């Protein structure tokens, strides 16, 4: 591997016709170019170029060696070109994880839009309420509620939402809230407590025991819509479901939940990741 640079220089000497011309082309001194050639010939134990004061010519071994050097240069140039193109056109694999509550309404529609615009993009969506290890799971982008305490992770706040305590309109019309079960996601635990606040700063406390639990937002939502009880629904999802679902305590609001985009890239983000972050942020903050 330490001879790749001398091999590239050797190919340039052949292609430009002289050490002087190669040095000018590579913006190196003649002595440095000569040293690269000398190191190759010494390491290989052969003469690659026959040189006089007026001309140079390849030996038979040098001609065969040059063909391989030329191919290495072509592959290297192709690799550079492909990386640059990936910063101009989104392409390749894109692994994204998000919790159930954000995936269907925000992340999946964003990815669908990008796939239509960039057919060479290959997304893989991982819907999980667990905070997966981005490096271990080879994840390019995570969309999560709340910041990460891991200093290795780069994060950007891209939006916010409020959970809303909801029930089906049929359940509210029946006036059966006192007996209604609380539908909890597994991560909420069994003992539920919510503090809500109105515009004047008046607080309302709500406590309950989770009588029905599920391990995904979609299942909880299906139970709430079916009239099985009351539970939390993000405000952006509730707007889609009204009037089938309604607020249990109109005029009272729960605290804001900040949403972050997280990744482990040290330098410039791949274009697909950057576009995805920007589009999700736009969906949170439509102009």
Image (spheres, rainbow, N blue to C red):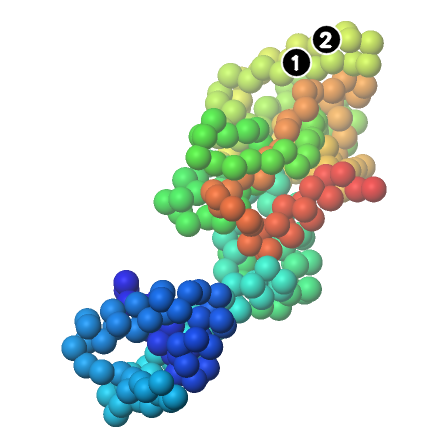
196 or 158, which is in the foreground?
A: 158
Q: Is residue 235 left or right of residue 214?
A: right
* Image point (45%, 30%), residue name: 151
* Image point (69%, 20%), residue name: 254
Q: In this view, does 139 lie above or below 144?
A: below
202 or 270, which is in the foreground?
A: 270
Q: Residue placed farthest to the top in the image?
A: 202
Q: What element carries label 1?
A: strand
Judge whether residue 153 can be spotted in this image.
yes
**Mark closer to the chain start, 2 or 1:** 1
Q: Distance between the residues labelled 2 and 1?
A: 7 Å
On the image, the x and y values in percent for residue 209 come to: 53, 17
Q: Do the residues labelled 2 and 1 touch (CB within 8 Å)?
A: yes
> What is the tally of numbered marks visible in this picture?
2
On the image, which quarter does residue 219 sit in? Answer: top right
On the image, the x and y values in percent for residue 39 come to: 25, 69
* Image point (69%, 48%), residue name: 279
Q: Is residue 190 above or below residue 240?
A: above
181 or 72, which is in the foreground?
A: 72
Q: Is mark 2 on a helix, strand or loop?
A: strand
Q: Is residue 104 above or below residue 30?
A: above
On the image, the x and y values in percent for residue 137 come to: 40, 47
Judge whether residue 144 can be spotted in this image.
no
Q: Is residue 70 left or right of residue 252?
A: left
On the image, the x and y values in percent for residue 138 come to: 42, 50
Which residue carries the number 2 mark?
203
On the image, which quarter does residue 133 sit in? Answer: top left
Which residue carries the number 1 mark?
195
Q: Residue placed farthest to the left in the image?
A: 45
On the image, which quarter does residue 55 sit in? Answer: bottom left
How packed is label 1: few (under 14 Cα within 10 Å), some, or many (20 or more)? few
Q: Residue placed farthest to the front in the image?
A: 53
């Amino acid at each position: 591997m330490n001879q790749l640079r001398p091999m590239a220089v050797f190919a340039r000497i052949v292609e430009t016709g002289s050490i002087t011309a190669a040095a000018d082309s590579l913006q190196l001194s003649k002595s440095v170019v000569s040293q690269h050639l000398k190191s190759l010939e010494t390491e290989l134990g052969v003469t690659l170029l026959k040189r006089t004061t007026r001309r140079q010519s390849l030996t038979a071994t040098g001609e065969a060696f040059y063909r391989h050097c030329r191919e290495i240069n072509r592959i290297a140039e192709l690799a550079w070109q492909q990386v640059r193109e990936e910063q101009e056109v989104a392409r390749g694999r894109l692994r994204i994880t998000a919790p159930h509550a954000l995936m269907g309404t925000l992340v999946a529609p964003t990815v669908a839009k990008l796939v239509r615009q960039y057919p060479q993009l290959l997304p893989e969506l991982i819907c999980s309420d667990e905070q997966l290890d981005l490096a271990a799971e080879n994840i390019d982008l995570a969309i999560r509620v709340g910041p990460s305490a891991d200093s290795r992770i780069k994060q950007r706040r891209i939006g916010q939402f409020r959970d809303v305590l909801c029930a089906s309109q049929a359940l509210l019309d029946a006036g059966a809230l006192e007996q209604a079960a609380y539908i909890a996601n597994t991560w909420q635990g069994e003992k539920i407590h919510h503090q809500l606040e109105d515009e004047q700063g008046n607080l309302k406390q709500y406590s309950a025991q989770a009588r029905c639990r599920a391990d995904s937002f979609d299942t909880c939502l299906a139970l709430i819509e079916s009239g099985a009880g009351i539970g939390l629904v993000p405000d952006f999802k509730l707007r889609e479901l009204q009037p089938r679902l309604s607020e249990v305590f109109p005029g009272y609001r729960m605290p804001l939940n900040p949403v972050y985009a997280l990744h482990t890239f040290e330098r410039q983000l791949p274009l697909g990741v950057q576009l995805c972050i920007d589009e999700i942020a736009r969906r949170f903050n439509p102009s």
